[in-house]
Amino acid sequence: MDVSIQEILTQAFGFAVLFWIMKKYAWKPILDLLESRRTKISSSFEEIDKTKKELETLQNNYTARLAHIEEESRVKIQAAIQDGKQMAREIQEQARTQAKDILDKAKQDIELEADKARVTLRKEIVDLVFAATEKVVHEKLSGQKDEETIIKFVKELEASQEPLMDS
């Protein structure tokens, strides 16, 4: 392999010219192409980071909204439960009041019937006493003195009967 100096110099000169041409005309477009590619990749990464942050923000917002909705639901359910319990208490209180009213009315009705029975019983006693007295005397009573005697007797009889009726 014989290598001459002239070949080396020609080769070096050719390389230098090629290097200069490449630097002047091709190097800048290649560097510009590489720079634009680097910028594009960098902006893509920035866009990805921005989108990722937006997604995280949206996810946090949705999570917060969901938690808020769940809390509102829980509060509304608790309010509905409390309303239901209050309604149940009101219904029970109404039922107690109605039962008490019915019981009071029944007591009044019983007392009224007892009073009526006492009046009827007194009338029957008067009639019986009157009939018994008439049989004993064998004559019909008449006059003021006989009537006073009967009234006195009935009052004594009523006084002796009241303790029996009250119990």
Image: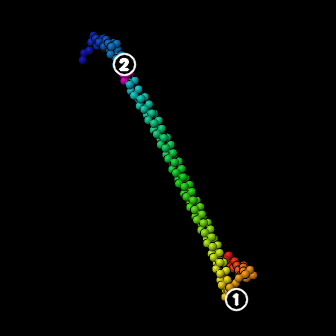
In the rendered view, does 74 fall on the left or right side of 151? left
Q: Nearer the viewer, residue 22 or 41?
A: 41
Q: Looking at the image, is 29 positioned above or below residue 74?
A: above
Q: Which residue is mark 1?
A: 137
User: Is 35 inside the magenta-drawn segment?
Assistant: yes
In the depicted view, which residue is nearer to us: 130 or 10? 130
Query: Which residue is tagged 2?
Result: 32
Q: Callout 1, which amino acid?
A: Val
- Stretch of the chain drawn in magenta: 31-37
Q: Main secondary structure of the magenta part?
A: helix
For the N terminus, give its image quadrant: top left
In the displayed structure, would residue 54 be above or below residue 110?
Answer: above
- Spot occupied by residue 106 in the image (x, y as percentages of width and height): 59, 68
Of residues 23 and 49, the one drawn nearer to the viewer in this rendering: 49
Contact? badges 1 and 2 (CB < 8 Å): no
Quadrant of residue 10 in the image? top left
Q: Residue at x 60, y 66 (%)?
A: 105
Q: CA distance from mark 1 to mark 2?
A: 153 Å
Residue at 25% in and 15% down:
2
Q: What is the three-letter code of the residue carrying label 2?
A: Asp
Helix, strand or loop at mark 1: helix
Q: Is residue 19 visible?
A: no
Mark 2, other Cα within 10 Å: few <14 / some 14–19 / many ≥20: few
Residue 40 on image: x %, y %:
38, 25
